Image (cartoon, helix red, strand yellow):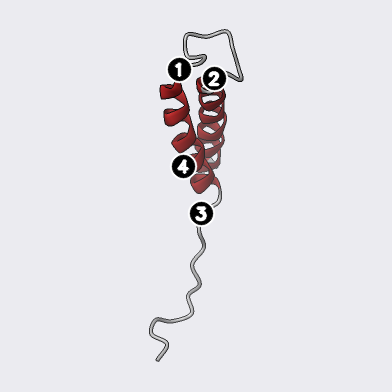
Amino acid sequence: MVSRVIGVLLVVVGAVWFFQGIDVLGGSFMSGNAFWAFVGLPMVVIGLAVLFPKRRSGGGGDAE
């Protein structure tokens, strides 16, 4: 439950920062500043990774 909340927060905040950085969302000192796009995009990716972790199959190791 906690990881889902963290994942959603990362995605939402990262998306807002990204869109402010590329000047889609205005009204902030971050608007039009590419730094925030470069910070926001990895936050979205990390948030999605927290929400949807890669599931590994337990099907053994070596396939020779």
Quadrant in which residue 35 is drawn: top left
Q: Residue at x 44, y 37 (%)?
A: 42
Q: Earlier in the sequence, mark 2 or mark 3?
A: 2
User: Would you name the residue on which mark 1 appears?
Assistant: 33
**Left or right: 40 as drawn, with respect to 12:** left
SS at badge 2: helix
User: Would you name the residue on which mark 4 appears?
Assistant: 46
**Residue 16 vertical placement versus 30 (above, below):** below
CB atoms at circles 1 and 4 under 8 Å apart?
Answer: no
Quadrant in which residue 19 is drawn: top right
Q: Position of residue 33 (x, y in %)?
A: 45, 17
Kind of residue indicated by mark 3: Pro
Kind of residue indicated by mark 2: Gln
Closer to the camera, 44 or 59? Answer: 44
- Observer-side mark, 2 or 1, equals 1
Whole-number angstrom distance, CA of label 2 to CA of label 3: 27 Å
Q: Residues within 10 Å of mark 1 (few under 14, many from 20)?
A: some
Q: Residues within 10 Å of mark 4 (few under 14, many from 20)?
A: some
Residue 53 disc label: 3
SS at badge 1: loop
CB atoms at circles 2 and 1 under 8 Å apart?
Answer: yes
Whole-number angstrom distance, CA of label 3 to CA of label 1: 31 Å
Whole-number angstrom distance, CA of label 2 to CA of label 1: 8 Å
User: Would you name the residue on which mark 2 appears?
Assistant: 20
Q: Position of residue 26 (x, y in %)?
A: 59, 12
